[in-house]
Amino acid sequence: MTAVRVQAATVRLGDKEIVSEVDFVARPGEITALIGPNGAGKSTLLAAIAGDVTLAHGSVHMGKMDISAASANALSRTRAVMLQDTQVAFSFLVRDVAEMGRRPWSRHQEAEDDDQIVDAALQATDIIHLAAREAMTLSGGERARMALSRVLAQRTSVILLDEPTAAMDIRHQEQSLGLARTLAKEGATVILVVHDLNAAAAYADHIVCLSAGRVVADGTVSEVYTAETLSSIYDWPIEIVTLGDGQVCVLPRGRTAN
């Protein structure tokens, strides 16, 4: 099992500091949700955790591996990444894209099961019927599910998802977040960026809230989701309602006129 430890992570793009001194631990068996307003640095932080953006200082460890010193192949066998932008620039078939998730395992014993693993990933994301379609012909939600199928096919212990359900209809949103929940239950460390606070409340075990590139709240849903905390972070009046089954619901309120 592979925990992800983020320590003093700082990212600068040009002369601007996008992420500042971020510390948290994402644990195996849990979904960690990165939340916060637009421009808070969530996607940049996720890219830094993935090793796709260089830290100005600080560190990210996946288990004992310092990602700054890891080879591309070692990273690809440890973490799988789904980006927010799921556009495909070339005429790949849907199955071709899912098969890309198997490339880190080429010439590895596990490669013998590639076809079975890819089929299972396509089935789990409900696009097995689209396997022979050109990826460029898919809708936004279908492309997102295709990107998720590649992540599933990669079979890594760390899963990084940037707004994975943004383009999906409600059925596929629930199915996809349910897949993330299943991966966590099987021992994966799942970190996802999400704007839907109610989805984060329903599926996440651990919430890390960013504002202006810094962690302003870190804990369980019940610890982070208070009306005072969220209203302050999002600069909007928010009510927190706990339903009969214990599920937390976030209700934004209109400001009253002075």
Image: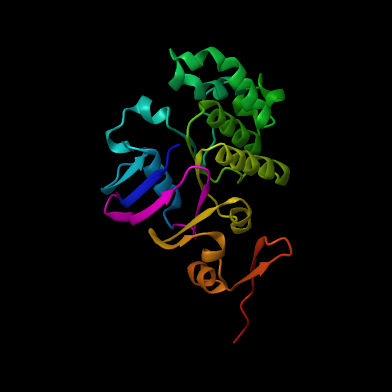
Q: Quadrant of residue 169?
A: top right
- Residue 95 spot, x, y in % from top left: 60, 21
Nearer-the-camera pick, 15 or 113: 113
- Residue 245 spot, x, y in % from top left: 72, 60
Q: Is residue 23 magenta?
A: yes
Magenta stretch, main secondary structure class: strand
* Direction from residue 105 to residue 16 in the image, left or right: left
* Direction from residue 163 to residue 1 in the image, left or right: left
Query: Which residue in the rendered view is the most extreme toward the bottom?
Result: 258
Q: Is residue 139 above or below residue 117?
A: below
Task: Please give the name of the residue rendered at 65% of the width and 34% of the height, measured from the top-left corner.
Answer: 142
Q: Can see residue 93? A: no
In the image, the segment drawn in magenta is 12-39
Nearer-the-camera pick, 42 or 2: 2
Task: Please give the name of the residue rendered at 44% of the width and 15% of the height, measured from the top-left corner.
Answer: 108
Which image quarter is the C terminus in?
Answer: bottom right
Task: Please give the name of the residue rendered at 63% of the width and 58% of the height, measured from the top-left corner.
Answer: 198
Q: Can see residue 153? A: yes
Q: Is residue 29 magenta?
A: yes
Q: Is residue 27 above or below residue 187?
A: below
Colouring rule applied to residues: rainbow
* Direction from residue 243 to residue 146 in the image, left or right: left
Which image quarter is the N terminus in?
Answer: top left
Task: Please give the name of the residue rendered at 59% of the width and 21% of the height, measured from the top-left corner.
Answer: 117
Q: Is residue 220 above or below residue 45?
A: below
Nearer-the-camera pick, 115 or 43: 115
- Residue 58 spot, x, y in % from top left: 27, 49
